[in-house]
Image: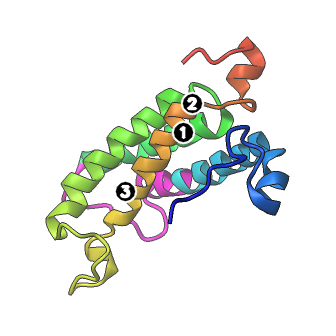
Amino acid sequence: MAASTEGMEGGSSGGVFGGILARYLDELYLLFRLVFAFLVALHGAQKAFLLWGFPAEHPLGSLVDIAGWVELIAAFLVGLGIFTRLGAGALCVTMVVAYFRVHADNGVWPHIYPPGGYGENGGEVAILWFIIAGLIGVLGSRKYGIERWFFKKEIF
């Protein structure tokens, strides 16, 4: 059975919720960016400032410190809408490095519960954050961002 695409060309067809939420797309995207930036900032601060039980000695050494600062700075860029694409790109690179340097050795499939517990792989976060940062990198800050407010366009 073929799916019908009738009424989808204008983008106004989306059912009850799609029609209501489409009016607030820019505001919802801002909320999405802010929540994502908040989570990334917490993760970066944990590594950069050794918070919430993060070990001072780590097998990856200074690479963890660099990742923490990149995550923290990129979170502020993405959240505030200043050089949003640059911050998102930095997060994408960081997540690729995180996955292949930390998580990939624990198994190819990050969703399989490893014998040592969830912390033994944890690659889902790196994969999801790579995808989310990639989408934010493509979309930029859109309507709400300090860069767009100040310069009337996105510079980066």
Q: Mark 1 or mark 3, which has the lower sequence index? A: 3
x, y percent for residue 156: 54, 18
The residue positioned 72% from the left and 26% from the top of the image is 146
The residue positioned 48% from the left and 36% from the top of the image is 88
Mark 1 element type: helix
The residue positioned 14% from the left and 64% from the top of the image is 105
Quarter-of-image position of residue 94? top left
Can you tell which of label 1 and label 2 is closer to the viewer? 1
Q: Mark 2 or mark 3, which has the lower sequence index? A: 2
Question: What residue would you read off at disc 2?
Answer: 84
Within 10 angstroms of label 1, few (less than 14), some, or many (20 or more) residues?
A: many
Within 10 angstroms of label 2, few (less than 14), some, or many (20 or more) residues?
A: many
Question: What residue would you read off at disc 3?
Answer: 126
* Residue extending furthest toward the left: 105
The Cα–Cα distance between marks 1 and 2, rounded to whole angstroms, is: 8 Å
User: What amino acid type is highlighted by mark number 3?
Assistant: Ala
x, y percent for residue 69: 43, 42
Mark 3 element type: helix
User: What amino acid type is highlighted by mark number 1?
Assistant: Ile
Instruction: Assess whether mark 2 and mark 1 are in contact (beta carbons under 8 angstroms).
Output: yes
In the image, residue 77 above or below residue 110: above
User: What amino acid type is highlighted by mark number 2?
Assistant: Thr
Question: Mark on residue 136?
Answer: 1
